[in-house]
Image (cartoon, grey):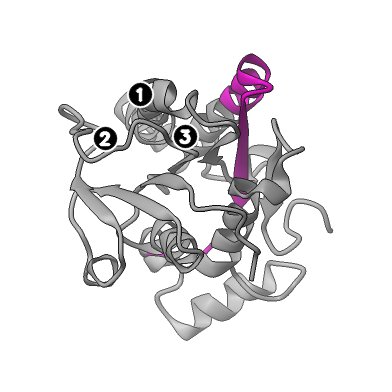
Amino acid sequence: MFVVAHMKNYLVIGASRGIGLSITQNLVNEKHNVFAWSRTASAELKQLNVTFSSNDVNSGNIDDASLPDMLDGLVYCPGSINLKPFQRLTQQDFMTDMQINFLSAVKCIQFTLPRLRQSDGASILLFSTVAVGSGMTFHASIASAKGAVEGLVKSLSAEFAPKIRVNAIAPSLTQTSLAEKFLSSDEKKEAAGKRHPLQRYGTPKDIADMAQFLLSDKASWITGQVMHVDGGMSAIR
């Protein structure tokens, strides 16, 4: 359990399930003010003390009426897992992955930047994938989009310093709704675990705990980093 210096305002985009929901739960447990955006509110999210707004950041206008004048943190969680052989990937596949993972993140950062600048120590957290740093078959589209995310982290961390910190987490396979088809049987789960040096695939809490740290004052001297929470996949052979 982290010690809270004071209550902060956080916006979590994609808060309804998976990693976003787990991050939201951690922040609520710390008694922070959490503003949760997703297309719909899941039953689990409805049980939490958050301010929810129905926003689809990949299309249409954003409703910001619920947001405070100051934000201490922005977490952008929407993502995709589109794995195909390169010759089967279409231009639309690349465009869709780029929109969900990169362009909509840019949109949300630009939209919230005036509020983040009102904080004495704001933090932006994005998500990459282990496949950017470790070449993996069938990952050309998603790794390209997440590679753009990593480039954005480096650029914005320089541009926004020292006022706003910008970091990313690069997970390996994590048990979320996006990964259901890869973990749909005991055999697949066992095989997925064995591919990782720590002999298991990830859970949303594994990722959320790192997110909680990076958003906190405990990480006040960390920016421009891509933190690998991947069971050792990127570092150990």
Report the amino acid beneath label 2: Val
Q: Which residue is mark 3?
A: 141
Query: Rounded to the nearest whole Å, what is the CA distance between mark 1 and mark 2?
Result: 8 Å
Name the disc covering residue 74, or none.
Answer: none
How many C-alpha atoms fall within 10 Å of the one at disc 1: few (<14), some, or many (≥20)?
some
- Which is more N-terminal, label 3 or label 1? 1
Residue at 52 percent of width and 39 percent of height:
126
The answer to which of 103 and 29 lies nearer the viewer is 29
Report which residue position mark 1 lands on: 107
Q: Is residue 131 above or below residue 201?
A: above
What amino acid is at disc 1? Answer: Lys
Say if the magenta span includes residue 96.
Answer: no
Earlier residue among tags 1 and 2: 2
- Seen in the picture, residue 182 relative to 133 is either above or below; the reply is below
Q: Amino acid at mark 3?
A: Ser
Q: Position of residue 148 (x, y in %)?
A: 54, 25
Residue 149: quadrant of the picture: top right
User: Is residue 17 shown left or right of residue 134?
Assistant: left
Q: Which residue is located at x 67 percent, y 56 percent?
A: 229
Q: Quadrant of residue 197?
A: bottom right
Magenta span includes 166: yes
Residue position marked by numbered label 2 in the rendering: 57
User: Going by the picture, which residue comes out furthest to the front?
Assistant: 6
**Residue 205 against residue 235 in the figure, above or below:** below
Mark 3 vs 2, N-terminal side: 2
Residue at the limit of the structure toward the bottom, as seen here? 186
How far from the left and from the top, in percent, is residue 116? Answer: 47, 29
Screen quadrant of the C terminus:
bottom right
Instruction: Tell me the mark number nearer the camera, choosing from 3 and 2.
Output: 2
Q: Position of residue 226 (x, y in %)?
A: 68, 40
Q: Which residues are magenta?
A: 151-176
Tell me the distance, in whole angstroms, between the alpha carbons under discs 3 and 2. 20 Å
